[in-house]
Image: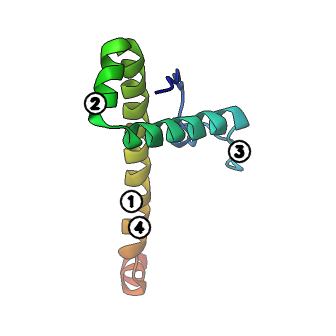
């Protein structure tokens, strides 16, 4: 199994709050996110035995990957909450509710 060393400092989701008003995210961070996504895909395609062998031979690398995946998951969850709040705001904004609030 090929070992990838990747320690992302920011994810695109986390970077969204730091992006310019136009939504621009630097290409280096997009590349980093693509590499992390590819790494996750590779990890998911490996057998439990392969992953156990990797954890035994290079536990620090596995720890780095776990940390990177956790950060990505937290950023994705925060982004999902953001979109859920926007959906909820629109779902509760019926014309009648807007009229009542305006009165």
Q: Nearer the viewer, mark 1 or mark 2?
A: 2
Q: CA distance from mark 1 to mark 2?
A: 41 Å
Q: Give 103 or 69, whichever is nearer the viewer.
A: 69
Residue labelled with disc 2: 49
Specify the label residue 24 is tagged with. Answer: 3
Residue labelled with disc 4: 87
Q: CA distance from mark 3 to mark 2?
A: 41 Å
Q: CA distance from mark 4 to mark 1?
A: 5 Å
Q: Give 4 or 7, whichever is nearer the viewer.
A: 4
Q: Do the residues under discs 4 and 1 have CB atoms within 8 angstroms? A: yes
Q: Do the residues under discs 4 and 3 have CB atoms within 8 angstroms? A: no
Element assignment for label 2? helix
| Quarter location, residue 27 | top right
Q: Give 37 or 54, whichever is nearer the viewer.
A: 54
Local packing at callout 2 (Cα closer than 10 Å; few below 14, some 14-19, many 20+) is few
Local packing at callout 3 (Cα closer than 10 Å; few below 14, some 14-19, many 20+) is few
Q: Nearer the viewer, mark 3 or mark 1?
A: 3
| Quarter location, residue 47 | top left
Specify the label residue 85 is tagged with. Answer: 1
Reading the chain from its start, which is encountered first: label 3 or label 2? Answer: 3
Q: Do the residues under discs 3 and 1 have CB atoms within 8 angstroms? A: no
| Residue at the extreme bottom | 96
Q: Nearer the viewer, mark 3 or mark 2?
A: 2
Element assignment for label 1? helix
């Amino acid at each position: 199994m090929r070992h990838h060393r990747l320690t992302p400092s920011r994810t695109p989701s986390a970077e969204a709050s730091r992006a310019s008003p136009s939504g621009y995210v630097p290409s280096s961070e997009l590349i980093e996110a693509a590499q992390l996504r590819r790494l996750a895909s590779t990890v998911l395609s490996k057998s439990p035995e392969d992953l156990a062998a990797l954890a035994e031979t290079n536990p620090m690398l596995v720890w780095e990957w776990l940390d990177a995946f956790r950060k990505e998951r937290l950023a994705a969850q925060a982004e999902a909450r953001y979109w859920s709040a926007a959906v909820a705001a629109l779902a509760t904004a019926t014309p009648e509710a807007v009229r009542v609030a305006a009165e």
